[in-house]
Image (cartoon, rainbow, N blue to C red):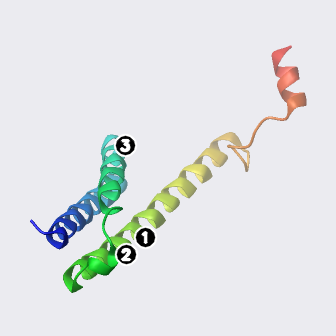
Amino acid sequence: MTRTREALATLQQMLALLQGERQALAALDLNRIVTCTQGKLDLCSRLEAVEQSSLDEECLGVLDAVRRLNEINRRLRNLIATNVQNRLSGLTGSSAPYSAISRQNMNLALV
């Protein structure tokens, strides 16, 4: 298999993985999200060895689709994180649920 065909196969795997990640995000399936993350890291390490100048038009098209889908997934992850933060704020009555406790309050809590 030529380098270009290997790169195309890897990019197609990445595209399928990103589609699976989007489904996992929509379903809030944490196990599948973690599995997809590890798969993306593995595929990225394989793609690092590929010279972009050696990619043909088909590979570049799939690469563009991968970039767009990754951006969509990133935005979806951010929306989910914002939603969780808003819900936590509503439950705790605090606008910053992830903020650190001040040292003075921590010392009082320990006493």
Q: Nearer the viewer, residue 87 or 55?
A: 55
Q: Quadrant of residue 54?
A: bottom left
For marks 3 and 1, give the one nearer the viewer.
1
Helix, strand or loop at mark 1: helix
Q: Residue at x 38, y 67 (%)?
A: 70
Q: Position of residue 40 (x, y in %)?
A: 33, 54
Q: Position of residue 7 (x, y in %)?
A: 22, 68
Indicate whether 57 appears above or below 41.
below
For badge 3, the amino acid type reads: Leu
Indicate whether 64 appears above or below 31.
below
Q: Which is nearer the N-term, disc 3 or disc 1?
A: 3
For badge 1, the amino acid type reads: Glu
Mark 2: few/some/many CA within 10 Å (<14, 14-19, 20+): few
Helix, strand or loop at mark 2: helix
For badge 2, the amino acid type reads: Arg
Is label 1 in contact with label 2 (beta carbons under 8 Å)?
A: yes
Q: Residue at x 43, y 70 (%)?
A: 71
Q: Which residue is mark 3?
A: 30
Q: Which residue is mark 2?
A: 68
In the figure, is residue 69 to the left or right of 88?
left
Q: Which is nearer the N-term, disc 2 or disc 3?
A: 3
Mark 3: few/some/many CA within 10 Å (<14, 14-19, 20+): few
